[in-house]
Image (spheres, coloured by chain):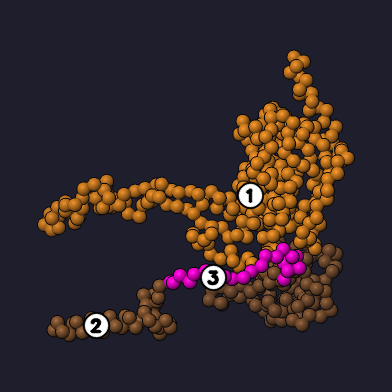
Chain colours: A brown, B orange
């Protein structure tokens, strides 16, 4: 028995020596099978310090923007997006664009997606006129009477049913 | 007698000014440039006043951003903020003992069968008088929770707008007082009808020496830097007096947060170990 055990020990010792010699990554290797860190000595990475504003502009281009900038005025945009019209101050009600320059109309799903509510947010001014116009428009799309709730204080309208794209299209055509 | 009346007469000189809102000095207040200008709402205007004399002098008009100072007065959001400010630091120390924590009760009081009495295993059972309490309050119970980020921001805009609409918001050029006597400040607050309690807000937390010494002894007139401004304190004090530089800082901070693009990074669920 003792002979076998000494032989085994030898084999294990040799195997561990082979492991140490082998520097390539071992398949199914883990934390314990990985090698220790070695001191690589002095590593010389060459760099240059510059305070040139032209160079800094290149860095600024890579940095993510903190806000979405004001879009450049064009007649038509490839995505179909449209900026708000310019005559907003003279209108009776106003729907503010979001920080991403989108129309704030959202779908609210609840009760395992059975309840579908469309919400028009950020309404300022005469919200009751908007309610009247929206119901007139939606009545053309639906056979049932339109049920909606107006919250003048918080500035939103909640409509029963999924009319998000229809309302977004309608508001876009009106210039909002 | 005359000596008693004379200091009070100082206030009467300004009586005629109560009814006039004309510019009383020629000092130039540089106009403000509003960032992220509103398309629909007009900028609001407010007088810049002085603090170096008891008589009020209007130094000039500045404009305020309507999204910050003319927001809807959402009292529901304000209530959420006040509730959160009271609760997040509240720890309930109400405590009751469970059955096993009450002394004794290890022995069965009487045999299970044969006595015609109800079966009981311990005299400290919750059914017994002097026994443990089932589902009672346990100490300490923290009530900490985090209000969503934009509820906190909207709470600030709502409260600032309410203060502005109710004429309880005043803008001063700086907080320099001529003396460090508290009577001067008390008289000034009284003559300008600023009510019993006043909160002075500046952009830095190192305030001028005179106003620090004067407010030190008055408990209902206090100083606060911009980074400490909160809904609860704004409601607690009758009048809010903000320096012009503090107005700039408050407005830029709120507008930056309302318009920033990377809001997804901090509007998620609050984790206790987050930075």
- Residue at (51%, 56%) from the top-left corner? B145
Residue A38 in the magenta stretch? The answer is yes
Residue A22 higher or lower than B146, as above or below: below
The spot of residue B7 in percent (x, y) is 76, 22
Looking at the image, can residue A58 be seen?
yes
Residue sitting nearer the eye, A138 or B259: B259
The spot of residue B185 in percent (x, y) is 70, 31
Residue that mark 3 sits on: A43
Q: Decide: marks 2, 1 in contact (CB < 8 A)?
A: no
Measured in 3D between alpha carbons, the distance from the residue under mark 1 to the one under mark 3, in whole angstroms, is: 45 Å
Residue A100 higher or lower than B203, as above or below: below
- Report which quarter residue A170 is drawn in: bottom right
Residue that mark 2 sits on: A10
Residue A61 higher or lower than B252, as above or below: below
Looking at the image, can residue B72 be seen?
no
Residue A143 in the magenta stretch? The answer is no
Dot in front, 2 or 1: 2
Residue sitting nearer the eye, B264 or A94: B264
Tell whether A164 sits left or right of A34: right
The residue sitting at the left extreme is B114
- Residue at (69%, 46%) from the top-left corner? B203
Q: What is the number of callouts on the image?
A: 3
Q: Predominant secondary structure in magenta?
A: loop
Judge the density around disc 2: few (<14), some (14-19), many (≥20) Cα neighbours within 10 Å.
few
Residue that mark 1 sits on: B227
Let me know if marks 2 and 1 both belong to one chain: no
The spot of residue A155 in percent (x, y) is 70, 63
Q: Which residues are magenta?
A: A37-58
Secondary structure of the residue carrying numbered label 2:
helix
Mark 2 chain: A
Secondary structure of the residue carrying numbered label 3:
loop
- Report which quarter residue A149 is drawn in: bottom right
């Amino acid at each position: 028995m003792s002979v076998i055990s000494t032989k085994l020990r030898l084999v294990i010792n040799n195997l561990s020596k082979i492991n140490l010699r082998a520097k390539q990554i071992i398949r199914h290797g883990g934390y314990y099978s990985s090698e220790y860190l070695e001191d690589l000595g002095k590593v010389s990475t060459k760099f240059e310090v510059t305070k040139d504003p032209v160079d800094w502009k290149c860095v600024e281009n890579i940095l993510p923007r903190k806000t979405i900038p004001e879009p450049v005025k064009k007649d038509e945009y490839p995505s179909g997006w449209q900026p708000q019209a310019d005559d907003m101050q003279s209108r009776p009600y106003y729907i503010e664009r979001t920080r991403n320059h989108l129309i704030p109309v959202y779908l609210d799903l609840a009760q395992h997606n059975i309840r579908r509510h469309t919400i028009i947010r950020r309404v300022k001014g005469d919200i009751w006129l908007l309610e009247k116009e929206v119901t007139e428009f939606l009545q053309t799309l639906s056979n049932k009477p339109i049920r909606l709730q107006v919250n003048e204080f918080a500035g939103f309208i909640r409509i029963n049913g999924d009319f998000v794209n229809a309302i977004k299209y309608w508001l876009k055509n009106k210039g909002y | 007698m005359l000596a008693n009346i004379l200091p009070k007469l100082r206030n009467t000189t300004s009586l005629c000014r109560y009814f006039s809102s004309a510019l009383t000095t020629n000092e130039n207040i540089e106009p403000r440039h509003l960032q992220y200008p509103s398309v629909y709402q007009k900028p609001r205007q407010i007088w810049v006043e002085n603090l170096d004399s008891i008589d009020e002098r209007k130094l000039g008009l500045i404009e305020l951003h309507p999204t910050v100072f003319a927001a809807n007065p959402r009292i529901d959001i304000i209530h959420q903020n006040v509730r959160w400010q009271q609760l997040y630091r509240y720890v309930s120390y109400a405590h009751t003992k469970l059955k096993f924590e009450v002394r004794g009760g290890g022995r069965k009081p009487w045999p299970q069968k044969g006595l015609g009495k109800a079966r009981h295993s311990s005299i400290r059972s919750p059914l017994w008088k002097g026994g443990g309490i089932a589902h009672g309050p346990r100490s300490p119970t923290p009530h900490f929770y985090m209000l969503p980020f934009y509820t906190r921001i909207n709470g600030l805009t709502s409260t600032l707008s309410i203060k502005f609409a109710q004429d309880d918001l005043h803008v001063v050029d700086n907080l320099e007082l001529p003396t460090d006597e508290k009577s001067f400040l008390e008289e000034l607050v009284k003559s300008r009808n600023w009510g019993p309690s006043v909160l002075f807000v500046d952009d830095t937390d190192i305030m001028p020496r005179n106003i620090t010494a004067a407010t030190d002894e008055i408990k209902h007139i206090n100083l606060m830097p911009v980074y400490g401004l909160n809904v609860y304190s704004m409601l607690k004090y009758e009048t809010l007096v903000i320096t012009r530089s503090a107005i700039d800082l408050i407005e830029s901070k709120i507008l930056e947060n309302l318009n920033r693009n990377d809001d997804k990074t901090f509007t998620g669920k609050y984790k206790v170990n987050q930075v």
